[in-house]
Amino acid sequence: MVSLAQLSNELGESLRPAVPGPVPGLQLSGVHVSELTDPGAYLEGGELLLTTGIPLGGTADAVDEYVQRLAAKGVAALGLGLGEGLDSVPPELVRACSAAGVELLVVPDGVPFLDVSRMFWELASRSDQAGLIANLGTQTALARATMRVDALPSVVRGLAQALGGWVAYLPAGDGTEATVWPANALSLLPHLKQETARLNIAGTHSAATFWLHGTPVVEYPILVQGRIDGFLAIGSGRTLTKADRQIIMTVCVLLALKAQQRDELRGTTAALGSVVAKLIAGGQVEAARLVADDGKIGPLPERVRVLALRSPTADVLPALAGVLPRLQRAEGSPLPAAAVTTCMLRYHDDAVGYFLLDARQVELAAGSQQEAGKEDAEFLAWTGGKGSAGPAAADPGPAATDIETAAAWTEPLTLEDVAGAMSAVHRAAVAAPAGTLVDLDADDEARADAWVAALAGYSRAELLETVAAYLRHQGRWEDAARHLKVHRNSLRHRMAVAERLLGVDLDDPDVAALLWLALRRHGL
């Protein structure tokens, strides 16, 4: 855009104000020449209109009416060319322009209107080139920002600075915190998240605009292979130009490419981690270290805790981290889910998922979890139980809550000792009652006592008495049903419920022996 002040400065005395003083920086939409008394049909508003004075009519009323028509059309300024009809500026024209808010300038005798038009278009060309260069420079800077380690904060900050507003990136559903710049826009996050959740539920795959605190916000989804990776929210406080939108679209493409690269890296890292974990489980520790070094997945931990979870297929392994806090342990706090979520050494085999957890990270995560729980308890005590010590834990989602699983894990082991513990942790995970986490160092007696407690706690049927009768009669359906005074089919149904509850096969002699002894200890 070219301003009136810019045009006047370039032309100097060839376009000067009628009344001495500074020329305002009004943005001009063009330069138009007309000698019509009403040129409104040929104007769009914002022009510098050049005339030799023929339309003025020679009277004060005619001058007032002419200027009012120009003002109604939105003309920015009137340029009066002297020499052809008028040798000086009429006082009534000065008064009329001042009253109507139309700037009045003078083109001296001998200066063709063509000089004014040519200068306007030359300045417009310079402005477009400068805008293009600035636009390209901004896009180049943003592209370089995506190559940095802190790519997302750098891109968000660069875009906000380029637009002169605020920018936020909200990841879609992975629990990652939003990235916002400048910091004073953080207060908008609760409203942004609420609106973004609504758009995400609606499956919006294109840009959307909504109002936030009286100003428009434009939000763009970042798509990676048909799924939404996150949302880019922009509040510029002004109307976005074509150049602004080009920059925004460039950022959207850059963020999508970065997200795709991250997903591909995660996939590669997960595959390498699975190979390394299987090598360790098979006793090939040195080979595992070589693969880890070549794959750049970091040095292996010195000691690990092997966690085994029952899972039907490998694709549900990521969801199992959300289940862990719900698993009951005989003693001690729940296993920290964060340690499982970040574990790269994991694989799936024979309906069991295996995680080789860094023992040091598990200790640190457990300590943080206990400290957070202590702080929550202190806060609730201080507020009388009515406060909230922080954001609620993220819901694990349907994929996690729908999984019925059990788990077992070992004490800290050296990598060389892992192979010898794999069979035991597998058997413990398979035999553990649903919804429990078994410590592998717990003896068989404690595990069987947990089975008895689970059967006794079942409220919809007398499972404890049913299982005791079945074992007492050594699996003979007719004798057990007669003892319980129930139909044989009812007994079969109850036994199936008991096996699902415990997650074991009650016809397995080892399981049956352990459970029978536990029942006898409890007086049954």
Image (cartoon, helix red, strand yellow):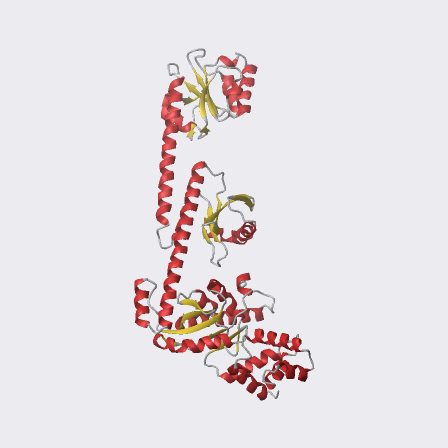
Image point (53%, 85%), residue name: 513
Image point (44%, 72%), residue name: 307
Instruction: Say if residue 18 shows up in the picture.
Output: no
The answer to which quarter of the image holds residue 271 is bottom left
Q: Is residue 510 above or below residue 234?
A: below
Instruction: Say if residue 211 shows up in the picture.
Output: yes
Q: Position of residue 14 (x, y in %)?
A: 38, 20
Q: Is residue 303 left or right of residue 200?
A: left
Q: Is residue 285 above or below residue 174?
A: below
- For this orientation, the residue located farthest to the right is 485
Looking at the figure, which quarter contains the N terminus?
A: top left
Q: Position of residue 123 (x, y in %)?
A: 38, 28
Q: Position of residue 72 (x, y in %)?
A: 55, 24
Image point (39%, 32%), residue name: 128
Q: Total number of numbered labels?
A: 0
Q: Pick whichever, 396 or 492, lies toward us.
A: 492
Q: Pick whichever, 233 or 401, lies toward us.
A: 401
Q: Is residue 206 above or below residue 347?
A: above
Looking at the figure, which quarter contains the C terminus?
A: bottom right
Q: Position of residue 350 (x, y in %)?
A: 45, 70
Q: Pick whichever, 116 or 463, lies toward us.
A: 463
The answer to which quarter of the image holds residue 382 is bottom right
Q: Is residue 506 left or right of residue 426?
A: right
Q: Is residue 294 above or below residue 240?
A: below
